[in-house]
Amino acid sequence: ETGVTQTPRHLVMGMTNKKSLKCEQHLGHNAMYWYKQSAKKPLELMFVYSLEERVENNSVPSRFSPECPNSSHLFLHLHTLQPEDSALYLCASSLTGYSGANVLTFGAGSRLTVL
Amino acid sequence: EDQVTQSPEALRLQEGESSSLNCSYTVSGLRGLFWYRQDPGKGPEFLFTLYSAGEEKEKERLKATLTKKESFLHITAPKPEDSATYLCAVRASGSARQLTFGSGTQLTVLP
């Protein structure tokens, strides 16, 4: 167990469905991230939440909606997705504000398939 | 624009056959270069951070080195359990919490 827990691990949804991915970290970190990992492509940062700011990649479609109710929980709400959104979605956390910042701890990922 | 290129895409080694993975980067002011290991069905696991040219770090059979343009991950006498995808990422000045990742090198070590 890495300290970052993602649920569900696998999700199959139709293009008209609405679902959510959940991430929880037990490490006392103060920043959380959503990354998208597609085959043969680099990890793509989607969203960052930290004490100071929320950062989002402007190329992420609005059908992905993040929510971060507190420093330990992060959600990714999904609606009207497209087949090309099928990928592994990784949650990560880190401790910011010191030299070790950006040492990310990742969860095991949620494998999403859009039919 | 920050860029990270990893080579080769895939590497097959016999157990005990040492080799190196390459990570070439272009970044405006390097604030850190990171190596991660990713096993199938799992998220990436942190290995090393390097901050300046000439720096080296070691962990078991792995040694990471850094120059002004690239980093190498040297694997000495690998074992089958070293099989994984190795990811390289950089953080640039002005990108407080954003990393740019490479596509990874998939390493297979045959017994």
Image (cartoon, coloured by chain):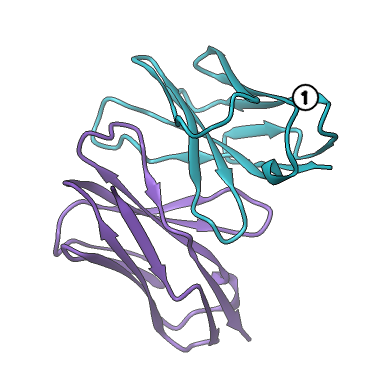
Chain colours: A cyan, B purple
Residue occupying the point 58% across, 40% down: A2
From the top left corner, tell me how far across and down residue B53 is, in percent.
14, 61
Mark 1 belongs to which subunit?
A
Q: Position of residue B85 (x, y in %)?
A: 54, 64
Q: Residue at x 60, y 77 (%)?
A: B80
Rendered position, B58 above or below A91: below
Give the percent coordinates (x, y) of residue B31: 21, 44
The answer, for residue B60, to whether it is visible in the render is no
Classify mark 1: helix, strand or loop. strand
Image quarter hosting the C terminus of chain B: bottom right
B101 or B13: nearer the viewer? B101
At 76% from the left and 33% from the top, the residue drawn is A8
Give the labeled residue for mark 1: A19
Residue A96: quadrant of the picture? top left
Q: Say which residue appears at 58% left-offset and 30% top-offset.
A: A61
**Position above or below: B75 against A54:** below
**Tag 1: residue type?**
Lys
B46 sits left or right of A14 in the view: left
For the residue pair B4 and A61, the one nearer the viewer reads as A61
Q: Residues within 10 Å of mark 1 (few under 14, many from 20)?
A: some
**Quarter of the image where one finds residue B92:** top left
Asked if residue B105 shows in the view, the reply is yes
Please state the total of marks drawn on the protein image: 1
A2 and B43: which one is in front? B43
Q: Residue B36, position in %: x, y?
A: 45, 55
Residue B103 vs residue B80: left or right?
Answer: left
- Residue B9's place in the image compared with B86, above or below, is below
